[in-house]
């Protein structure tokens, strides 16, 4: 009989331990879920900030490229006019 009492006591202790571990695991998974949700919000905010910053940078880059192209065109026209004046003389 003593062996049966010891086995029942061990089974009860293991059951209580497994239930406690299961409850703790559920709590950890809930915390993990809320942490992932917060990280997702942070990443969405960062994406919005990057998008809002990249639009003006792209516009500025395009404007500088257009300015550089216009400057090259103006320089080419100036060189062409200078060559025509040299040929006329």
Image: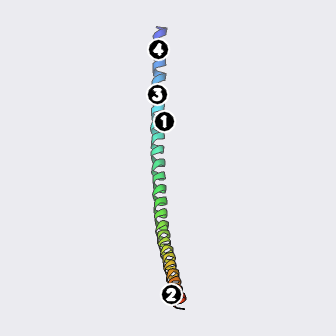
In this figure, which residue is indicated by the disc labeled 2? 84
Helix, strand or loop at disc 1? helix
Q: CA distance from mark 4 to mark 1?
A: 25 Å
Query: Which mark, by number, is residue 24?
Result: 1
| Earlier sequence position, callout 2 versus callout 4 | 4
| Earlier sequence position, callout 4 versus callout 3 | 4
Q: CA distance from mark 3 to mark 1?
A: 10 Å
Select label 2 or label 3 by which is in front.
Answer: 2
Helix, strand or loop at disc 3? helix
Q: CA distance from mark 2 to mark 3?
A: 95 Å
Select label 1 or label 2 by which is in front.
Answer: 2
Q: Report the residue at 46% width, 48% height from top.
A: 36
Q: How many marks?
A: 4
| Earlier sequence position, callout 4 versus callout 1 | 4
Select label 4 or label 1 by which is in front.
Answer: 1
Q: Are marks 2 and 4 in contact (CB under 8 Å)?
A: no
Mark 2 neighbour class, 10 Å CA radius: few under 14, some 14 to 19, many 20 or more: few
Q: Quadrant of the C terminus?
A: bottom right
| Earlier sequence position, callout 1 versus callout 2 | 1
Instruction: List x then y, in percent, for residue 40.
Output: 45, 53
Q: Report the residue at 45% width, 43% height from top.
A: 30
In this view of the protein, which residue sits in the foreground, 48 or 21? 48
Q: Are marks 2 and 3 in contact (CB under 8 Å)?
A: no
Given the current orientation, which residue lies at the most extreme bottom position?
Answer: 89
In this figure, which residue is indicated by the disc labeled 4? 7
Select label 2 or label 4 by which is in front.
Answer: 2
In this figure, which residue is indicated by the disc labeled 3? 18
Relative to 70, say whether 16 is above or below.
Answer: above
Relative to 49, say whether 34 is above or below.
Answer: above
């Amino acid at each position: 009989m003593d062996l049966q009492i010891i086995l029942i006591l061990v089974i009860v202790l293991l059951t209580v331990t497994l239930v406690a571990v299961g409850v703790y695991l559920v709590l950890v998974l809930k915390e993990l879920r809320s942490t992932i949700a917060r990280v997702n919000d942070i990443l969405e905010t960062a994406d919005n900030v990057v998008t809002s910053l990249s639009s003006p940078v792209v516009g500025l880059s395009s404007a500088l490229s257009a300015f550089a192209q216009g400057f090259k065109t103006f320089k080419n026209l100036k060189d062409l006019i200078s060559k025509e004046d040299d040929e006329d003389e």
